[in-house]
Image (cartoon, helix red, strand yellow):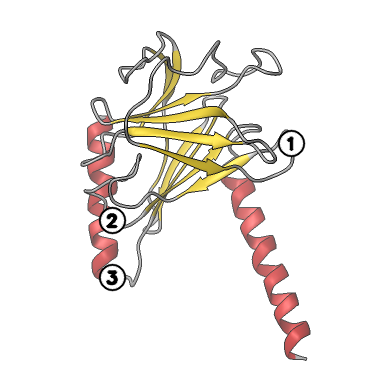
Amino acid sequence: MRKLSFLAALLLSMTALAHADSFSISITVDEQGHGTFTNTNGFNSTLSSSLKADPGPGGLSSVLTYDLLNPPGLVSGDVFLLEPGSLIFLDVVRFNASNGSLVFYSDNIDGFDSLGDTPAPPSSFYANTITINEIGPEGNNFAIYTPTAGQPGFVAGAAGPVTYTLISDGAVPEPSTLALLGTGLIGTVGVVRRRFTA
């Protein structure tokens, strides 16, 4: 069933390329086990998650794992997330091509208060790594990451770029909340534009 879901999303992607100038995929995950998969052609799906053994190098036996719907050509690797003002990474997001998954290792500095909190990061890493900075105030940190060819999480078989929103503190907003936020941002841009043109 999950394979069919990804194939449906991929077919919608190809249709979008034929009918639009640009096409993209957005995947949003958090350390609480909430995830979404959307694309600009209107496909929207919840990503399932569970605590599973990480098959990657040095993987732990019980880690928050998201099923990415078996994307064709997923590139394995580790993404190290730096919190604002920090020089060391505390969270690791791992992509495993072997089972089409995203694994979320979250720090436990504030205790074990989320599904993604682990006693430690993996004991070893893929050779393919990248470090990115999180943004947002403490307690609401996230990172936006669009991998290019060869980077962890890149999907060679996708019909357009895949952008990941990785929320290390907080939770994935409900779709209705995202719609309200988008409407508010569009309204704000319109007001600002009118002020500058008046």
Give coordinates of residue 40: x percent, y percent: 40, 58
Q: For mark 3, give the secondary structure.
A: helix
The amino acid beneath tag 2 is Ser
Name the element at disc 1.
loop
Q: Identity of the amino acid at label 1?
A: Glu
Element under disc 2? helix
Label 1 packing within 10 angstroms: few (<14), some (14-19), many (20+): few
- Please report whichever mark, 2 or 3, sits nearer to the chain's N-terminal start: 2
Circle on res. 19? 3
Point out residue 126 in the picture as x, y percentages from the top left corner: 33, 28
Residue, x 32% and y 31% (percent of image)? 127
Residue ID for mark 1: 138
Pick the front one: 31 or 78 = 78
Q: Residue furthest top?
A: 61
- In the figure, residue 159 lies in which quadrant? bottom left
In this view, the residue in front, 54 or 87, is 87
**Amino acid beneath label 3:** His
As drawn, the label of residue 13 is: 2
Q: Quadrant of the C terminus?
A: bottom right
Counting from the top left corner in percent of width and height, residue 48 is at: 41, 27
Q: CA distance from mark 1 to mark 2?
A: 36 Å
Q: Pick whichever of labels 1 and 3 is earlier in the sequence.
A: 3
Q: CA distance from mark 1 to mark 3?
A: 41 Å
